[in-house]
Image (cartoon, rainbow, N blue to C red):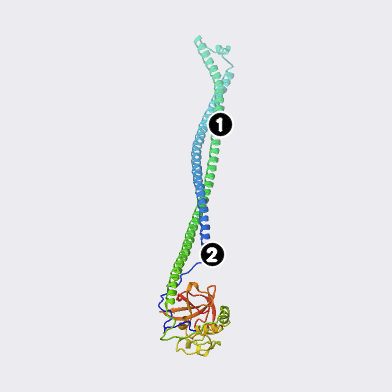
Amino acid sequence: MLVGVLGAGNGAGNAVAVPPAPPNPSDAEIDGGRATADARATRVGQLTSEVARAESRLMASRADVETKLEDANKALVDLATATEAATQARADADTAEHAARAASADVEHARTRLDEFAASSYRQGSTVGSLSAYLGARSPRDVLDRAALLNAVADSGLDSLDDIEIARTAKANKDSQARAALAVAAEKQRQATEAKNAADAAMAAAQQAQRAQQAESARLRQDMTRAEQELTQARAQVGGLESQRQRYQDWLAAKEREDAASAAQAMAAPTVDTVNSVAVTAAPAASTVKTVIDRALSQQGVPYAWGGGNANGPTQGIHDGGVADAHGDYNKIGFDCSGLMIYAFAAAGVQLPHYSGYQFEAGRKVPLNQKRPGDMLFWSSGGRIHHVALYIGNDQMVEAPYSGSHVRVTSVRYGGIVSQATRLL
């Protein structure tokens, strides 16, 4: 029974493949990106609140510094006033000292006069109204003059005694006033100095607190700037992942439309190419996909050899005059891509030609997005098929990839893949 036909040298027919599939980020990647962006947005919100509180504390700190500065200014004025008062008090004390010395001189002068009067009276043996004052007189006028002189001397002595007491009292008062004024001035100056020192210390502490608050505010602003940058990056990353997902979905829709068109074209194509047909025996009903896949998987690690492989297993490669020869494929026992397909499907009784282009035409075409395990996948360049692999499920395939390699299992490569798979089973 004929189940497929081939056109000479033409693999993919007239179908035009859509561009290679774009990256398709997983739901976990997108959800993780969104979670990261949300976490960073929360962090930005927290830092914004912290910055606002720090700025409020900074404003309070500035107000405190200004208050302390005014306190220092007041203390400076008070100190200047107290210093001026102390200077004046010292000047008043000096004046009082001079007055006290003058009073002392007056006391000494009065004492001297009193001493002289007492001594004179003693030498003359006379006092005011005494008989000797009259006995020495030569005339009544002389008596009168001598009496007046003695009275004057007596009065002067009494005045001297009064002067001594007045001078002593004045000296004591002035000394007391000077000491009191000086003590008050000294106390005010001490208090003003202490107030100035306290104000300076308070202002220094306030300024230090302000500097610390400024540093904290600056650090928080830097943290917030970094957090905002990280948030922008996270949102951009999420946007990029979502854009990739959208591009992939658009690509998948285009691929499905292309696959549907290709399937319709395949349904309308003749079953036999009368010019150059190759007959392939259909698989018996008892054939299983698992048998074919297991047979292909059993050859993992076998070297790639161009032209190698048949229904019985790996064979020696052949010369190609190029890349394969450069890798010594003609001296290796192994498979090339179509040789591995021949060996795998032979387990199900399916005979395939040793050419990937003919293998593409060997069975029913299905849209690539409907592929299932056991289907053959193809790749083309310039409209000509150049590679084949066996799909084994979970977006994995087994293949003999290229010279210098070996049979392996790998993820399906969508770059350059043909939009249809070939199904034999």
Q: Nearer the viewer, residue 319 or 65?
A: 319
In the image, residue 120 sits, relative to residue 83, either above or below, namely above
Q: Position of residue 126 (x, y in %)?
A: 58, 15
In the image, residue 214 sits, relative to residue 196, either above or below, namely below
Q: Nearer the viewer, mark 2 or mark 1?
A: 2
Q: CA distance from mark 2 to mark 1?
A: 91 Å
In the image, residue 261 sits, relative to residue 161, either above or below, namely below
| Mark closest to the chain's N terminus, 2 or 1 | 2
- Kindly tell me whether residue 116 is visible in this rendering: no
Q: Nearer the viewer, residue 124 or 77?
A: 77
Tag 1: amino acid: Ala
Residue at the far top in the pictured view: 140
Residue at the far front in the pictured view: 1
Q: Name the residue tied to disc 2.
A: 28
Residue 180 is marked as 1
Q: Secondary structure at mark 2?
A: helix
Tag 2: amino acid: Ala
Q: Position of residue 112 (x, y in %)?
A: 55, 25
Q: Are marks 2 and 1 in contact (CB under 8 Å)?
A: no
Q: Position of residue 178 (x, y in %)?
A: 54, 31
Label 1 crowd (10 A; few <14 / some 14-19 / many >=20): some
| Count of numbered tags | 2
Residue 115 is marked as none
Q: Secondary structure at mark 1?
A: helix
